[in-house]
Each structure stands twice: as structure tokens, then as C-alpha cells.
Image (cartoon, rainbow, N blue to C red):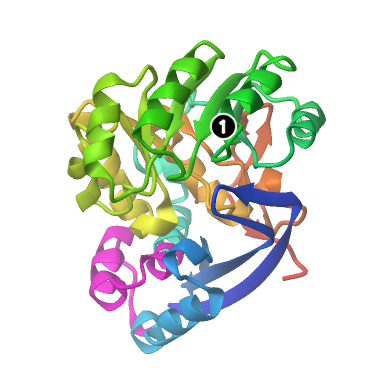
Amino acid sequence: MELTLYPFELRFRHTFTISRKSKDVQPLLVAELQEDGWSGLGETADNSYYNITVPILMAAINAHRPFIESYKLDTPEAFWEAMYPKLSDNLFALCALDLAAHDLYAKRLGKKLYEVWGLEPSHNPLTDYTIGIDTVENMVKKLQEFPWPIYKIKLGTKDDIAIITELRKHTKAIFRVDANCAWGVEETLRNAAAFKELGVEFIEQPMPAADWEGMKKVYETSALPLIADESCIVEADVKNCHGYFHGINIKLTKCGGITPARRMILEAKQLGMKVMTGSMNESTVGTSAVAHLLPYLDYTDMDGPLLLAEDTADGVKIRNGKIIYANRNGTGAELYRAF
């Protein structure tokens, strides 16, 4: 296979703020694999929380370029198994290659990726749209600027209940709350009780990932369902989250791509847990890949292209929360000609 890497740095529409940081740009890396006239695209994102940068991603992939370019693709799963020992310390990099392999493979079969798996997308969940932490006045403006059926509200301030109370005055949309590890036990329980009365559907990662004892207490008495994010990174984490969270949020960049994500989905379902996929602010390349997992899911947060002022590719479209697949095989993503 021929490997090409495309680094990007895309601007956000608004400064994107969560409980631990703010940023105005999102660095991303797109990988392209070509073989026998077919081309596949994959994407991954930088993330300071996991000490991942685009130069680190490129170096990790380029270190194995000779192996990748001598590899003859049979199935994406076999390729992932071959690459995992080489990139087990950088699953973000492995994700880009895995997505590209799935895209190429499905195109070679003449099918959309969800068709390769025998899935039917007519009952796909809607995606939420994220409102980052800001002044409450600006958060209200963002709601009004972007009417949407489901909002994911980033919290982790001293005024979290007041924020949701004020936002609720301006929309009847479903709210989901993501605290990004910002709360403790008492704060989580207090907020959950208040938020239930304010139309919040669930809370994502309320407490630090290492606080399993605290999460157990919260899980047993919380007024709202709790979804793991930072506590569920790779496949081994799924069973660890059972009995501590009501569901898991799978991010392809963190777990290493579609191949492990599908196994995580199956395991979580067998354990009776809810499953969602999350965004790492990927452009349309990565978002188009995530879209093909939707028939498996209960919830999804795949609003990356909506939050960015720029994009890398044409692919899936998002209309009022609904995902519309591109009329192409594979994942449906196609890089803009300028790139």
C-alpha cells in the first residue's frame, strides 16, 4: 500500500472550552492508503490530555512506513492486528490507519462500510451539538445561533446548576452534560438531582477517571445515568466500567480505530450498558467513519465538523441532528481538491 499523511490545523467557529482547557484551533492528521487503484482515508486528532501531537503521530506512523507500504491488505481487522504490536503505545496513530484500511476495503467490495457489516441505518440516533463553557450569556447565544434537537453542555464551573437553569429557559431540546472529570461525589449527586428536573438525559464523566470508589457511590444513587469517557479508553476498560457507569462513550482515536470499537460495542451491549461514540473534534474524514457505527449505538456525539470553521473533506452531512451518508462507497469521505 502507498501511504500519504496530511497534517491539518483547523480553526473552531468559537473558542472551544471544557473544564480543563480552551483552544481556538484543532490540529488533525489524515492518513491515506492506496492500493490497486483504490484509496482509503482515515483521521486522528491531537490531544494534550493524552500528550498526543501531530508531529508525534506522524513520527509514530512514519517509523513503520516500510512495513505499511509492503503490506498487502486482506481485511482491515488483519491489518489492525499486524499494526497493533507496532503502535500499541500510540493508538491515536493506529486509528488513522485503521479507518483508512476500512474505507479502502469497503470501496474494493463496492459497498458502503455499514453494508459490509450487514447493518441497516434507518433508526440511527441523532447527534448532539456541543456548547462549550463560556459566560452564560454567550452560551445562550450559541443555542440561539444553532437551533438543535440535542445539546451536549460542557460544565465544570462553580455555577453549573445556574447555567443549565438559564439555558433551559431558551430551548426545549434534550440536554446532555459533560463535566470532563471536574466534580466530586457530593457535587455530582447534587447536580444530577437538579439536572433531572431540568431535562438532562445523562451525565458524561462527572469525576476523575481514577476515582473508582467515588464513582461506585455515585453510580448507586445518582438521579441520572452516567456515561464513561476518560474512564473508558481501550477494550480492557469496558468490563472495568460495568457497575460504575450506565454506559460508555467510545472514541475511535483513543481505542485505536473501528476494529477495537466494534468489539467494545459488542462487549458493552452484552453487559447491558448503553453505548455512544464521541467526538475528538475530527473533521469530516473521521466523522464519516464514525457514522457507519450508528446502527449499533444508543447515542452519538459526532459534531466535529459543525464546531470547526474549516474542513478537510466532503462526506457525511448533518442536518438537524440527522446523519446523511454520502453517495459513495467506503466511509464516503473525499478530500477537497485543494489538499
Identify the residue at horizontal 64%, vertical 17% (top origin): 173
Report the residue at 36% width, 71% height from top.
90
Residue picked out by circle 1 = 127
**Per the image, is 137 magenta?**
no
Check the image and report above or below for 93 versus 211: below
**Where is residue 28 drawn, in percent x and y?**
59, 66
Residue 7 visible within the image: yes
Image quadrant in which the C terminus is located: bottom right
User: Would residue 325 appear left or right of 123 to someone viewing this image?
Assistant: right
Please state the horizontal and vertical placement of residue 97, each as a whole percent of the image: 42, 67
Circle 1: residue type: Thr
Left/right of residue 152 with respect to residue 252 in the rendered view: right
Residue furthest out toward the top:
197
Label 1: element kind: loop
Q: Nearer the viewer, residue 86 or 331?
A: 86
Q: Magenta segment range? A: 70-97
Q: Residue at x 47, y 76 (%)?
A: 57
Viewer-proximal residue among 334 and 128? 128
Between 256 and 31, the one lying in front of the other is 256
Residue at (31, 47) in percent of width and height: 232
For disc 1, the neighbor class at 10 Å (few under 14, some 14 to 19, many from 20) is: many
The image quadrant that residue 101 belongs to is: bottom left
Q: Quadrant of the N terminus?
A: bottom left
Q: Up-down: is 195 above or below 9?
A: above
